[in-house]
Image (spheres, rainbow, N blue to C red):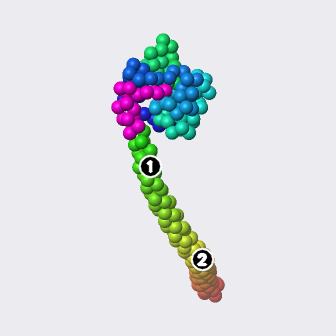
Amino acid sequence: MADLPNEMIEKIYEAVELARSTGTIRKGTNEVTKAIEKGDAKLVIYAENTNPKEVIMHIPLIAKEKGILCVAVPSREELGTAAGLPVSSASVAIVKEGESKKILKELKEVLDEIPAQKEAKEPKAEAKEPKTKAKETKTEVKETETEAKEPKAEAKETEAEAKEPKAEAKEPKAEVKETKTKAKETETEVKETETKAKETEAEVKEESPKKIEE
């Protein structure tokens, strides 16, 4: 059943009171069921807090089959009070409206508007779907951009690998420099040896005249 505003629920209780005093009502599940089946009921009201629920489950179904207006109210205690009973009531049927006719007409108009309101809300839900699809498209674009960046990263890695052989090429140059340094050191040693040899020859020459004099 459709959810009714509290103001409308209070008017339903009022309609039951007016119909009780100026028209005709049926009280209790058995009498209400008979009024529905005979097609006498103008409005059927049942209480949602009825326990067990099986007691009233059939009422909205048969009322719909008969094309009779059927509404739910939250309290069986308040429904019983409106019907003039000292105890609670699970359901009430208005058979002759009396002065409640105006309220019943207003209630019917409210219930007729509810399906139209629901249909008006549905396109909003459909309108949200394109936004969702737009977000999915943006996500796909970002993924494509990420994939495009990956080849750049791979290209940088290739460049880094290409630079490594240059570093390796520098190493033989260092080895050549070391060899040249060693060669220079050998040349220096040779020169030193030659110098010593010359000094030795000079000493020999100096000693030879002395021996002759002796």
Whether residue 104 is in magenta: the answer is yes
Q: Residue at x 57, y 76 (%)?
A: 162
Task: Classify mark 2: helix, strand or loop.
Answer: helix
Whole-percent x, y for residue 198 in the image: 59, 84
Image quadrant in which the C terminus is located: bottom right
- Using the image as rendered, state which of residue 152 and residue 92 is in the foreground: 92
Q: Position of residue 117 (x, y in %)?
A: 41, 45
Taking depth in this image into account, of 118 and 36 the one nearest to the observer is 36
With 62 as the anchor, is 104 left or right in this view? left
Percent position of residue 137, x then y: 49, 63
| Badge 2 amino acid | Pro
Mark sitting earlier along the chain (2/1):
1
Closest to the observer, 32 or 206: 32
Which amino acid, by three-letter code, is at mark 1?
Glu
Pointer 2: what residue? 165
Q: Nearer the viewer, mark 2 or mark 1?
A: 1
Q: Which span is picked out in magenta?
A: 93-109
Placement of 208 over or under 147, stated as above or below: below
Would you call the spot at circle 2 few (<14 residues within 10 Å), some (14-19), or many (20 or more)? few
Would residue 58 appear left or right of 8 to someone viewing this image? right
Was residue 21 drawn as part of the magenta stretch in this picture?
no
- Residue in the image at 44% along x and 15% along y: 84
Q: Considering only vertical position in the picture, is 129 above or below 6?
A: below
- Tell me where residue 82 appears, x and y as whole percent: 43, 19
- The residue indicated by pointer 1 is 119
Residue 63 in view (yes/no): yes
Q: Secondary structure at mark 1?
A: helix
Q: Residue at x 59, y 32 (%)?
A: 58
Few, some or many residues within 10 Å of mark 1 (<14, 14–19, 20+): few
Compute the Cα span from label 2 to label 1.
73 Å
Question: Which quadrant holds residue 184?
Answer: bottom right
